[in-house]
Amino acid sequence: MTKTIVISILLIALTDVALQLDNALAISSVASSVPATYRLPVLAGGVLLAACCLLLFTLIGSNLIERLNWLKPVAGLVLVVIGAKLVYDYVRS
């Protein structure tokens, strides 16, 4: 049981790092167009806003999935459709 918990925590951490890297790229691309004197506050604010949004939407999503039993299969189906579309677009191009 402990091994399962450790693996789950590592997978969640890996996913979180991947999502944060995506946010970092988006924030840095926005900050690159800002004058140098404002760049650090824009970067810091963007990272803070992204972290707050990630926490808020995770809490909202987990509460919704806990309360609405039908939402978990629907969310799984949406993920499968998005994954299939990504694979299709990758193979097509």
Image: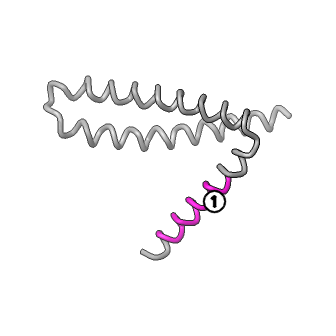
Instruction: Judge left or right: residue 28 versus residue 80.
Output: left
Tell me what residue is drawn at x 51 percent, y 43 percent: 18
Q: Secondary structure at mark 1?
A: helix
Q: Quadrant of the N terminus?
A: top right
Question: Which is more toward the observer, 29 or 10?
Answer: 29
Question: Which is more toward the observer, 52 or 14?
Answer: 52
Where residue 21 appears, as percent x and y from the top left, is: 44, 41
Q: Is residue 81 above or below residue 75?
A: below
Where residue 85 appears, as percent x and y from the top left, is: 53, 65
Where residue 20 appears, as percent x and y from the top left, is: 46, 38
Q: Name the amino acid, label 1.
A: Val
Secondary structure, magenta segment, majority class: helix
Instruction: Judge left or right: residue 37 versus residue 48.
Output: left
**Residue under label 1:** 80
Tell me what residue is drawn at x 58 percent, y 41 percent: 14
Where residue 77 appears, as percent x and y from the top left, is: 66, 57
Tell me what residue is drawn at x 27 percent, y 43 percent: 29
Q: Which region shows up in magenta?
A: 76-89
Instruction: Judge left or right: residue 51 versus residue 2.
Output: left
Q: Is residue 76 above or below residue 31?
A: below
Query: In the displayed image of the protein, which residue is found farthest to the right?
Result: 1
Q: Is residue 30 above or below residue 51?
A: below
Tell me what residue is drawn at x 54 percent, y 32 percent: 57
- The answer to if 81 sits in the magenta stretch is yes
Q: Quadrant of the C terminus?
A: bottom left
